[in-house]
């Protein structure tokens, strides 16, 4: 099974990141998310560049605040710990580059839903973390990009996070993020998000090798007389990858 860990979509002039876990997941026996990956997510959703200051508000609804300290340590980022009521005042939202909403559920008031939708449509960024919906769709997203949650608050211990083909070409991705741990806190099947989403990273429970862990199977030596550089040896590595891949070595 493949469960979503990072997905993105755009709505109006703004952007949304679905991140069902927490950036700071230590309090659930998980790991702090790589700070560079955290920064890259925030840059994309807030539509900011590498050297820009990012201002975020983090709001928790009936869940442990699992993001504040990790995000506050990310380079060139300031985060304000807000309350749910802060989202009832639209003026509080436009002053921030992005909103990090921890614990979104279907009891959120129509006013807050409307404010969040308007904020994103106008160019704001929204990150949805620590989803609190079981066996149901997220009502906030039904008119934007539907998502159905299988269960919330569930850590799936098997498998490893992998970057999808969409993820590897997304602006958030960097080669150094291969193999980075992303704890799964909610189970959202890859097939349970609409086509409006780009699914960047999933936990695949059917693989048992961490992405980026390549095992060297064979070391090949060839004498210099067979190569174009006299007086030297070249070394070629044949490696196996986690998805029945093939590595070709070409020489001239």
Image: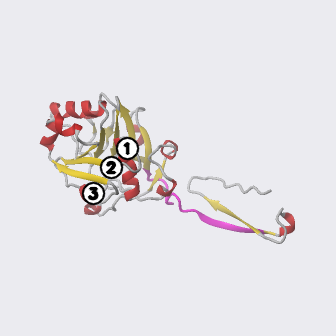
Looking at the rendered image, the quarter that the C terminus falls into is: bottom right
Q: Tell me how many marks there are.
A: 3
**Residue 225 horizontal/vertical position (percent):** 87, 67
- Is residue 51 left or right of 243 when viewed as pictured? left
Dot 3: element: helix
**Residue 187 horizontal/vertical position (percent):** 34, 47
Which sits in the foreground, 52 or 199?
Answer: 52
- Mark 1 or 3, closer to the camera: 1
The reply to whether residue 154 is visible in this rendering is no
| Label of residue 53 in the image | 2
Q: Around disc 3, counting alpha carbons within 10 Å, would you say few (fewer than 14), some (14 to 19), or many (20 or more)?
A: some
- Residue at position x 80%, y 71% from top? 232
- Is residue 188 left or right of 175 when viewed as pictured? left
Q: Are marks 2 and 1 in contact (CB under 8 Å)?
A: yes
* Label 1 vs 3, first from the N-terminus: 1
* Label 2 vs 1, first from the N-terminus: 1
Which residue is under mark 1? 48
Which sits in the foreground, 14 or 95?
Answer: 95
Q: How is the image coloured?
A: secondary structure
- In this view, the residue farthest toward the right is 225
- Mark 2 or 3, closer to the camera: 2
How far separated are the C-alphas under marks 1 and 3? Answer: 17 Å
| Label of residue 81 in the image | none
Give the image quarter of residue 230. Answer: bottom right
Picture layout, residue 47 above or below residue 72: above
How far separated are the C-alphas under marks 2 and 3? Answer: 12 Å
Which residue is under mark 3? 72
Q: Around disc 1, counting alpha carbons within 10 Å, would you say few (fewer than 14), some (14 to 19), or many (20 or more)?
A: some
Q: Around disc 2, counting alpha carbons within 10 Å, would you say few (fewer than 14), some (14 to 19), or many (20 or more)?
A: some
Magenta-drawn segment: 203-221
Q: Within the magenta stretch, is there residue 175?
A: no
């Amino acid at each position: 099974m493949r469960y979503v860990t990072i997905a993105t979509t755009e709505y109006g002039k703004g952007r949304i990141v679905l991140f069902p876990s927490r950036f700071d997941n230590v309090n659930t026996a998980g790991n702090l998310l790589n700070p560079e990956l955290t920064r890259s997510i925030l840059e994309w959703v807030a539509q900011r560049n590498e050297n820009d200051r990012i201002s975020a508000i983090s709001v928790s609804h009936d869940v442990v605040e699992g993001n504040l300290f990790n995000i506050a340590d990310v380079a060139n980022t300031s985060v304000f710990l807000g309350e749910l009521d802060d989202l009832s005042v639209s003026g509080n939202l436009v002053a921030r580059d992005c909103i990090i909403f921890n614990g979104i559920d279907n009891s959120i008031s129509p006013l807050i839903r409307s404010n969040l939708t308007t904020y994103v449509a106008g160019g704001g960024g929204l990150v949805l973390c620590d989803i609190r919906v079981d066996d149901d769709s997220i009502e906030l997203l039904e008119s934007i990009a539907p998502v159905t949650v299988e269960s919330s608050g569930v850590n799936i211990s098997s498998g490893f996070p992998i970057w999808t083909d969409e993820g590897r070409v997304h602006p958030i991705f960097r080669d150094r993020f291969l193999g980075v741990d992303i704890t799964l806190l909610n189970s959202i099947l890859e097939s349970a998000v609409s086509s409006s989403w780009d699914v960047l990273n999933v936990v695949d429970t059917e693989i048992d090798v961490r992405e980026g862990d390549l095992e060297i199977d064979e070391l090949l030596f060839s004498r210099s007389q067979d190569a174009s550089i006299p007086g030297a040896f070249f070394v070629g590595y044949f490696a196996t990858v986690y998805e029945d891949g093939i590595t070709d070595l070409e020489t001239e």
